[in-house]
Image (cartoon, rainbow, N blue to C red):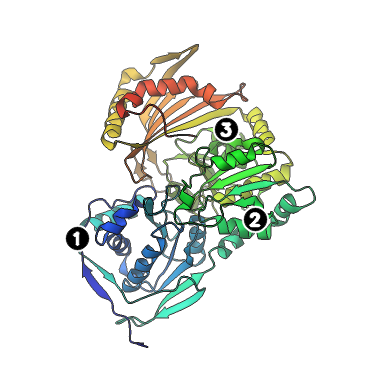
Amino acid sequence: MDNSPLQVLTVPTAPYPDQRPGTNGLRKKVHVFQSRRNYLHNFIQSIFSSIDLRDRQGSTVVVGGDGRFFNRTAIEVIVQMAAANGVGRLIIGHHGVMSTPAISCVIRKYKAIGGIILTASHNPGGPDGDFGIKFNTANGGPAKEAVTNKIFQISRTIEEFTICPGLKVDLTTLGKQMFDLENKFKPFTVEIVDSVESYANLLRNIFDFAALKELLSGESHIKIRLDAMHGVVGPYVRRILCEELGCPANSAINCVPLEDFGGQHPDPNLTYAADLVDSMRDGQYDFGAAFDGDGDRNMILGKHGFFVTPPDSVAVIADNIFCIPYFQHTGVRGFARSMPTSAALDRVAKATKIELYETPTGWKFFGNLMDAGRLSLCGEESFGTGGDHIREKDGLWAVLAWLSILATRGQSVEDILKDHWLKYGRNYFTRYDYENVDIDAACEMMEDLEIMIADKSFVKQRFAVEDKIYQVEKADNFEYTDPVDSTITRNQGLRIMFSDGSRIIYRLSGTGSDGATVRIYIDSYEKEQVFEDTQVMLAPLATIALKISQLHHRTGRSGPSVIT
């Protein structure tokens, strides 16, 4: 056996112009990573080169992914390049699989300089699906724009990368593996860790596991149904909810992570988690939840498939926040929501006199507020909810938060929601997604729309649909000044706000890999009529939204791909 130090090579390469990380990292079709020479290597080198050599030397980096196709191939390259770039230790999830919330937890626990997360979140997997690479910094959260811009600039001019091609790591065996590299004084260490344990321990210190165990397996236990959608969160659900909290094993479905998510779209909403919704309809389950590919998103359902919108979900958790022991100890520093998310949370914040922040879409904005000690709970309409225990949204945390509320209040999901609406009024909210739209047509539509709403004559315009009249009070392109560091983030979505508090918002989403996704958000507040059908209540505003944008005509689409 050859025990000589492993060789480090410098390999010439040529840059690609399209490696700009979006809100959630770099996402492309798998075949892009497979077919373009050194495409993966270039981006990984750009990440390492964005970190000052003094910080990189001997540092710890966490690596894991949602188990989708190309995950293992990418990890092999990352290991070889991390070693060659002076990283001292890699911490990798068992089999290369670790949820995004768990990676955030492990980065913070081990004081790593960051983590590389291999996921395209809720996008499809498999050889014909999507693959993504996201860099999280030392706080455990997504890299800020200054960092992602630096990575992008390096990727545009890269001429070479360094790699240790002879280094082979065993992802199947827990424990440390040491490697001697030429011209390195210290061995390079790879530590394969239990993907669940550090994260599970964090949750034990947040929630009352004894109360949750009584709720889920005690004498008067409720019946629940959890769908991991063949994503990364399956092993976490089995270990924490089934083995530790006593749920029957058949409470958890689709818990084996698969490279193609079983051919499904691992997106926890009413469209893609339809099997879960159907299984809830007959009333045999009191509570249901679904998770996305990398475990950071969640959907909450009550008996008979009663749907809790993500904006309502975070508002209810806020109103019942002291059902969670963690917040009894820390207190509540602030609430936040992304701009497109309905204003349901604002009403709780106002009633409780707790500061409310409205941010652009992207968890990094919440992370900045958390790091400054200003934020405890936040949520996005895109099925993301979380607390300041980590710096990512956290699907399993949200489910345990809801179960804690059920345990404390002894009511059903539906009754808790209805009580909430009676107390605060209801923000009717929906989102229409038009996926894989021609990018030029989408951009032209948004440009024309912005010109229209920027015209002074647009304000005070009245729109009549049936017997309802809506008058424009304000219209703009949302921009955000961070209260912590005063950085300004512009062009975050076109907003039309009406005199009754209703809003229509248009955004181009940056999380897909194919074409553009146009999203229309509609938010309307009702103080009295709180038990009506959402789509019926929002139909007049939906008509106005389509009329103003001429979206169907401009994109050639007759209707949305997904309604949530």
Q: Specify few, some or many for label 3: CA neighbours under 10 Å numbering under 14, 14-19, or 20 or more.
A: some
- Looking at the rendered structure, the secondary structure element under dot 3 is helix
- For the residue marked with disc 3, what is the amino acid? Arg
Residue 293 position in % (x across, y down): 48, 51
Residue 151 badge = none
Q: Are marks 3 and 1 in contact (CB under 8 Å)?
A: no
- For the residue marked with disc 2, what is the amino acid? Leu
Q: Are marks 3 and 2 in contact (CB under 8 Å)?
A: no
Residue 157 position in % (x across, y down): 20, 58
Residue 454 position in % (x across, y down): 31, 25
**Residue topped by disc 3:** 347
Give how far apart the Cα atoms at labels 2 and 1 are: 48 Å
**Is residue 250 at all visible to an observer of this figure?**
yes
**Residue topped by disc 2:** 241
First of labels 3, 1 by sequence position = 1
**Residue topped by disc 1:** 14
Q: Using the image as rendered, state which of residue 352 and residue 414 is in the foreground.
A: 414
With 157 as the anchor, is 559 left or right in this view?
Answer: right
Q: Using the image as rendered, state which of residue 514 and residue 462 is in the foreground.
A: 514
Q: Is residue 327 above or below residue 55?
A: above
At horizontal 44% and vertical 53% (from top left) the residue drawn is 260
Give how far apart the Cα atoms at labels 3 and 1 are: 53 Å
Quadrant assignment, res 59: bottom left
First of labels 2, 1 by sequence position = 1
Q: Is residue 519 above or below residue 71?
A: above
- For the residue marked with disc 1, what is the amino acid? Ala
User: Which quadrant is the N terminus positioned in?
Assistant: bottom left
Q: Nearer the viewer, mark 3 or mark 1?
A: 1
Q: Specify few, some or many for label 1: CA neighbours under 10 Å numbering under 14, 14-19, or 20 or more.
A: some
Q: Using the image as rendered, state which of residue 56 and residue 506 is in the foreground.
A: 506
First of labels 3, 2 by sequence position = 2
- Looking at the rendered structure, the secondary structure element under dot 1 is loop
